[in-house]
Every structure is written in structure tokens, then in C-alpha cells.
Image: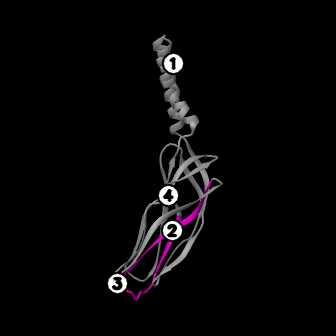
Amino acid sequence: MKVRTAVILVALLVLTLTVVASANVTVGYATTTFGPQTFQADSFALSGQSGTLSLSTVTTTTSDINGAVFLVGYSAVAYASEALTVSYDLTLDGVTHTLSQPATWSVTPSIDTFTAAAGSPVLFVTPSGTWLVALDAYSIPATNIGTFTQSTAADFVPVPEPSSLLLLGLPSIAVAWRRYRG
């Protein structure tokens, strides 16, 4: 009897992990623009974009969600820097939140750089799943006058739904109950 119960519990666990591990969902997204912001002879903007993302409900997914444009001009000032906060809206599967990240803009005679640190995670509870979304760090260095573009990305970390946690915990609960009953 104990062997049969153990086999059933192991089969349930394997089935549950197989169903949970293979879950990917496709969701719509859109980001708004940011800027343009100017500093010395430079300007920086995020263009905003939209489309679909294939997100895992089990492991972290990293996806490009916006486009940065760094316009570098001739700055008469030899050395200068400025701190700012980059923020814009992300709509994920119909749910909108504002994402932000600290940034530093540096101007020197040899290189102008726009550097954004990673943003704090924001919880998105959508019809297709729940994710913590954090903007990734990036840097755009420019050694000459011109226009520089770069995609910016975010990490989508799945948050297990209570029902998934229950399914994963059921075998442990069953074993504890069987031991309790004798």
C-alpha cells in the first residue's frame, strides 16, 4: 500500500512539473516614449514600441521593449554630467504600469555617454500570468558626433500563481497526511 501511494505521488509530481515547465504565453505589449531630453549639445529619447512577447511562466524571459536614440552634438563644455530618471509606461496584456530607472549623462572631450542603471521590479498581474518586470541596465557611449541607437530590454520574472504552488505542494501534503494517519 505504501509503495503504491509513493508511486502515485511521484507520478502526480512529474505530471505537475511537466505541465508547469512547458508553459509559455504570448502577450501583447506597448511602451510609451520618453523625451527627448537635452543636455549640453546632446539629446536622448526612447521611441516607444509595441508588438507581442513570448513569456515563460516558469523562467525569466529577457526581451527588447523600447528603442533608445542618442544624438550627440559638439559640446563646448569640457566635462559635465547630469543625473536623471528615465520613466515610461509599459502596457502588458492590457495592464499598464510606469517603469523607471536612474540614469547618468556624461559629456567629456573624448566621449559622451548615456548610462541607465537597472530599474526596480514592478508587479504585473495580467489575465495570462503574473510577472515582476525590471528594466535592464544599458550604456550608449559615443566617441564622435552623430546618432546612436540601441534597443533597451527588460526582465520578465514569472510569479507562481497560488494554484500552481498548490499543485506543486499537493504531493508533500499527501505524504504528510499518510504519515499522520498511520
Would you call the spot at circle 2 few (<14 residues within 10 Å), some (14-19), or many (20 or more)? Answer: some
Q: Which of 88 and 23 is in front in this view?
A: 88
Where is mark 1, residue-wise?
A: 177
Q: Which amino acid does label 2 sit on?
A: Val
Alpha carbons under labels 1 and 4: distance apart: 43 Å
Specify the segment rendered in magenta.
Answer: 66-92
> Badges 1 and 2: C-beta atoms under 8 Å apart?
no
Q: Which residue is drawn at 55% across and 31% down?
A: 166
> Badges 2 and 4: C-beta atoms under 8 Å apart?
no
Where is mark 3, residue-wise?
A: 109
Does dot 2 land on a helix, a strand or a loop? Answer: strand
Q: Which residue lies furthest to the bottom in this view?
A: 76
Does dot 4 land on a helix, a strand or a loop? Answer: strand
Alpha carbons under labels 3 and 2: distance apart: 25 Å
Where is mark 4, residue-wise?
A: 154
Where is mark 2, residue-wise?
A: 86
Alpha carbons under labels 1 and 2: distance apart: 52 Å
Left or right: 89, with 75 as reference point: right
